[in-house]
Amino acid sequence: QVRLVESGGGLVQPGGSLRLSCAAPGTILSTFTLYTMGWYRQAPGKQRELVATFTSDGGTNYVDAVKGRFTISKNNSRKMVYLQMNNLKPEDTAVYYCKGTAGSTDSWGQGTQVTVSS
């Protein structure tokens, strides 16, 4: 497993933007690149759901609710994964988690809270 640390959450008004970051401190680059990275979220009283992820062939996949508003990106040399969130809506309020998958191994960060409210 790898250690993942999210940052960038906070309180934002509807229509605003945030960029979440996920770092993999202490992980060497060759290990980090083995992991397929993604972002998930969990709202109060709801199950954790996929938000955006890279696919095994290097593409991206988004849940329908965020298509056109969120963008996942990564910088392998910095061992970072990002989630740019634009036009945020109150229903985007959740704890956002970074996840890395390599084979049958999943690694999760501790999560960062995103609250969209006026």
Image (cartoon, rainbow, N blue to C red):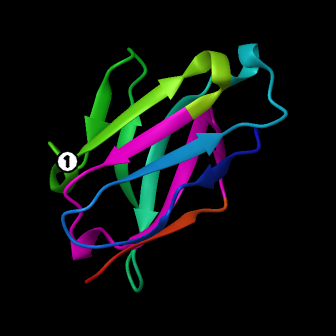
Task: Tell me if 40 is positioned left or right of 91 in this view.
Answer: right
Task: Relative to 61, say whether 43 is above or below.
Answer: below
Task: Tell me if 63 is positioned left or right of 53 in this view.
Answer: left
Magenta extent? 81-109
Question: Which residue shows up at 61% across the image and 52% down it?
Answer: 6
Q: Quadrant of residue 58?
A: top left
Task: Relative to 73, say whether 105 is above or below.
Answer: below
Question: From this viewpoint, is residue 93 visible?
Answer: yes
Q: Quadrant of residue 46?
A: bottom left
Of helix, strand and loop, which one carries label 1? loop
Residue toward you, 70 or 63: 70
Question: Which residue shows up at 59% across the image and 43% down it?
Answer: 22
- Most frequent secondary structure within the magenta stretch: strand
Q: Quadrant of residue 87?
A: bottom left
Please state the horizontal and vertical placement of residue 116, each as a whole percent of the image.
Answer: 31, 74
Say which quadrant the C terminus sits in. bottom left
How many numbered discs sit on the rendered protein? 1
Residue toward you, 75 or 37: 75
Please state the horizontal and vertical placement of residue 83, each as a whole percent of the image.
Answer: 41, 43
> Which residue has dot 1 on it?
69
Q: Tag 1: Cα neighbours inside 10 Å, few (<14), some, or many (≥20)?
A: few
Task: Relative to 60, say whether 99 is above or below.
Answer: below
Which kind of residue does numbered mark 1 sit on? Arg
Say which quadrant the N terminus sits in. top right
Please state the horizontal and vertical placement of residue 96, each as a whole percent of the image.
Answer: 48, 61
Please state the horizontal and vertical placement of residue 9, each as a whole percent of the image.
Answer: 50, 62
